Image (tube, coloured by chain):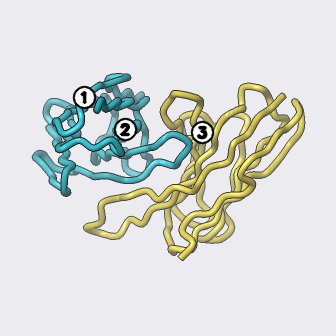
Chain colours: A cyan, B yellow
């Protein structure tokens, strides 16, 4: 079977940096994605890592270590609009399996 | 492009009733997925399809059926609705061309209540 672990909640201050970790166990691993979901909305794609290393897209970066079955999402210069839930998702060839999500609270 | 569309947006069903949740995409994506999301939880994969005529079970397929007769449409059928199927249902699609990031595009969701 497969499992993904991420913290249920994280709190940070506006303007700061926050890291959301994800560890996974899966029978076949092809890549790790990150999605953002605001309350009442649909998930939206943030990033995808198939290889080890850091991918940067604006204020967001995502890291993957395949040997450690671990990845993280880094959000810089936090803004109030970043208050949302963040999901890591593992790609197992044709299937994409989601974690339970991390609720990010941002304090002014 | 409309992207991924889902109908209806909301529905209340009585226990034992049946219904079909509609999903369509106009991006010519081969891959389509159905997820359910319970309050405060992650998304659970119900069924997915890698192309017209091909479907496969995900993590929680019991109580659901799907079909994929065209590239554009991927309806989800609930037979004999149960309260445990109260959830938000999301349809998603993706392209799998070489070099792409396997981004899933999600529809707005269908909020289903079974009472």
User: Residue A22 sits in which quadrant?
Assistant: top left
Q: Which residue is mark 1?
A: A12
Label for residue B39?
none
Q: CA distance from mark 2 to mark 1?
A: 10 Å
Instruction: Report x, y in % for residue B79.
Output: 82, 40
Q: Secondary structure at mark 1?
A: strand
> Would you say A15 lies left or right of A4 here?
left
> Would you say A43 lies left or right of B78 here?
left
Image position of B54 with respect to A65: above or below: below
- Toward the viewer: A39 or B97? A39
| Front tag of 3 and 1 | 1
The chain carrying label 3 is B
Q: Quadrant of the C terminus of chain B?
A: top right
Residue at the image point whose x is 25% and y is 67% from the top: B99
Q: Which residue is mark 2?
A: A83
Q: CA distance from mark 3 to mark 1?
A: 29 Å
- Toward the viewer: B83 or A86? A86
Residue at the image point whose x is 66% and y is 58% from the top: B6
Instruction: Report x, y in % for residue B109.
Output: 62, 49
Image position of B104 with respect to A40: above or below: below
| Front tag of 3 and 2 | 2
The chain carrying label 2 is A
Residue at the image point whose x is 64% and y is 65% from the top: B24
Q: Mark 2–mark 1 contact, CB under 8 Å?
A: no
Q: Which residue is mark 3?
A: B36
């Amino acid at each position: 079977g497969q499992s993904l672990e991420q913290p249920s909640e994280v709190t940070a201050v506006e303007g700061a940096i926050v890291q959301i970790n994800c560890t996974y166990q899966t029978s076949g691993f092809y890549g790790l994605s990150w999605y953002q979901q605001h309350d009442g909305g649909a998930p939206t794609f943030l990033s995808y890592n198939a290889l080890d290393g850091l991918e940067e897209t604006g204020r967001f970066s995502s890291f993957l270590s395949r040997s450690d079955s671990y990845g993280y999402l880094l959000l810089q210069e936090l803004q109030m609009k970043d208050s949302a839930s963040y999901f890591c998702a593992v790609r197992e060839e044709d299937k994409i399996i989601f974690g339970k999500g991390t609720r990010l609270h941002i304090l002014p | 492009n409309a992207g991924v569309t889902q109908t209806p947006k909301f529905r209340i069903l009585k226990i034992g009733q049946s219904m079909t949740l509609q999903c369509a995409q106009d991006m010519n994506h081969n891959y389509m997925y159905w997820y359910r999301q319970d309050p405060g939880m992650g998304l659970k994969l119900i069924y997915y399809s890698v192309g017209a005529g091909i479907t496969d079970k995900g993590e929680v397929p019991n109580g659901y059926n799907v079909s994929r007769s065209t590239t554009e449409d991927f309806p989800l059928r609930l037979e004999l609705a149960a309260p445990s199927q109260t959830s938000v249902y999301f349809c998603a699609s993706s392209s799998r061309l070489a070099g792409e990031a396997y981004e899933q595009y999600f529809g707005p969701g269908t909020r289903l209540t079974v009472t």
